Image (cartoon, rainbow, N blue to C red):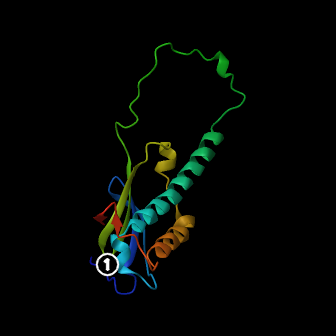
Amino acid sequence: MKKNYENLPYEFLLLINDKPIVGRNFSIRGFNSDSLRSLELKEVIDDAVNIIKRQFKSKTSDYLFKYYNPYFAYSDVVVDTEPHKVDIYANEDIFTFQIKVKGNVVIQKIFSGNHYPPKVRYDVDIRKNIPDIIATIQNGLVQKNYTKELCGYAL
């Protein structure tokens, strides 16, 4: 089914292993098309992804404190002298955050989800952060001046 992008042409999409988790269409008043070829676009997506990562970090802390037992005598546990080598990236979960304009991906950022416990990364709930993410994207794409050149190269 083809989407109609006339009213809400801008979209962000969060995927895990190329499967959509959450996405929202929204409008931007005063959109500056120069923003699509600027250094500030990278800063916008970094800020939006950091909002998501902060929430993951917060949920990870809550999760770890929930299952921490302060009454367990850790000194009585027999510790193996042989370290166990576990590759946490064997079945890596890849998160992809995309910003789209009229259905076309203009920028995306990929980050690993294996830094967070499976319970946290598979139970993603960023509904309360959606207004902040949209506001970050909107504020980044309506500026008047953009950096269009970096180290002598056009972006």
Q: Residue furthest front?
A: 152
**Above/below status of 91 relative to 39:** above
Q: Position of residue 57 (x, y in %)?
A: 56, 49
At numbered mark 1, what does the secondary structure look like: helix, strand or loop? loop
Residue 125 seen in the current view: no
Q: Is residue 6 left or right of residue 129?
A: left
Q: Amino acid at mark 1?
A: Lys
Quadrant assignment, res 147: bottom left
Which quadrant of the figure contains the C terminus?
Answer: bottom left
The residue pinned by badge 1 equals 102
Q: Is residue 51 left or right of residue 151?
A: right
Residue that appears at 36% across and 42% down: 92
Residue that appears at 44% across and 21% down: 84
Residue that appears at 51% across and 14% down: 80
Q: Position of residue 79 (x, y in %)?
A: 55, 16
Quadrant assignment, res 141: bottom left
